[in-house]
Image (tube, helix red, strand yellow):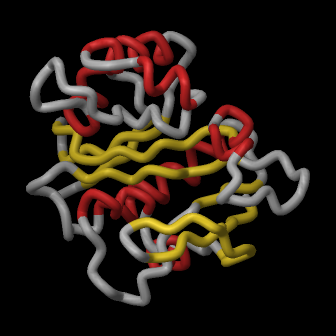
Amino acid sequence: MAITVRPATVFDDIKEVVGPKHPDASVCWCLTYRLPAKENKALTGPARGERIAAMLQDGPIGVLAYDEDEAVGWAAVAPRTETTFDRSRTIPRVDDADVWCVWCIRIKPGHRKKGISHHLLAGAIEFARGHGATILEGYPLDNAGETINTTMAYVGTKALFESAGFRHVADTKSVLDGFPRLLMRLNL
């Protein structure tokens, strides 16, 4: 397995990893933290994918991991100011620094437990750095090695972020699957 990570520019590849199995399903499409709550809630079914396609017209919206030519993983990465984290009541803003954030790391079923999340996080770091970011934040779970429900594992773990050089800079009020989320940073 030779994993490569590239900017997410191909709609069909994004759809392969974060899109629904059934076209009319209202799955996340990784829009929850990108859009204001009212707009996010109003988008249902195919309109969610159409919104992603429209966003792609402005350039890449994250990174994808490939095993040869197959898209097998996704990481959302963008300036914090372009996300709802910028106004979050549960994930604090620790200072006025111009930060980017990586908030979703998704591995396609059948490809999990192969280290792909490490490749995706490294790709997100390079993507942010390549776009001029000087600080990258993540909001992973502090699960202390305990098993996380697959549905909630998309935020990553403290151990994953630590392995990429991130450091814990603040606690948050956010909890997923019973585990607290941390605010972790990497200076680029």
Residue 64 position in % (x across, y down): 36, 40
Name the side, left or right, on which 175 lies relative to 117. Answer: right
- The residue shown at (60%, 28%) is 36
Q: Quadrant of the N terminus?
A: bottom left
Which residue is at 37% across, 57% downward? 154
User: Where in the figure is residue 33, as x and y percent of width and height?
Assistant: 53, 39
Q: Quadrant of the C terminus?
A: bottom right
Given residues 24 and 11, the one toward you in this image is 24
User: Could you tell me residue 127's position as x and y percent?
Assistant: 57, 43
**Side of 153 where 121 appears, left or right:** right
Query: Residue 22's image quarter?
Result: top left
Q: At 73% from the left edge and 43% from the top edge, which residue is drawn?
A: 86
The residue depicted at 13 percent of the width and 53 percent of the height is 109
Please state if 163 lies on the left or on the right of 81 as rendered.
left
All told, the count of numbered labels is 0
Q: Residue furthest right?
A: 96
175 up-or-down from 76: above or below: below
The quarter of the displayed image where residue 110 is located? bottom left
Where residue 34 appears, as percent x and y from the top left, is 55, 33
Location of residue 12 (image quadrant) = top left
- Does 89 sit above or below residue 168? above
Q: Is residue 74 above or below residue 140?
A: above
**In terms of depth relative to the viewer, which is nearer, 5 or 155?**
155
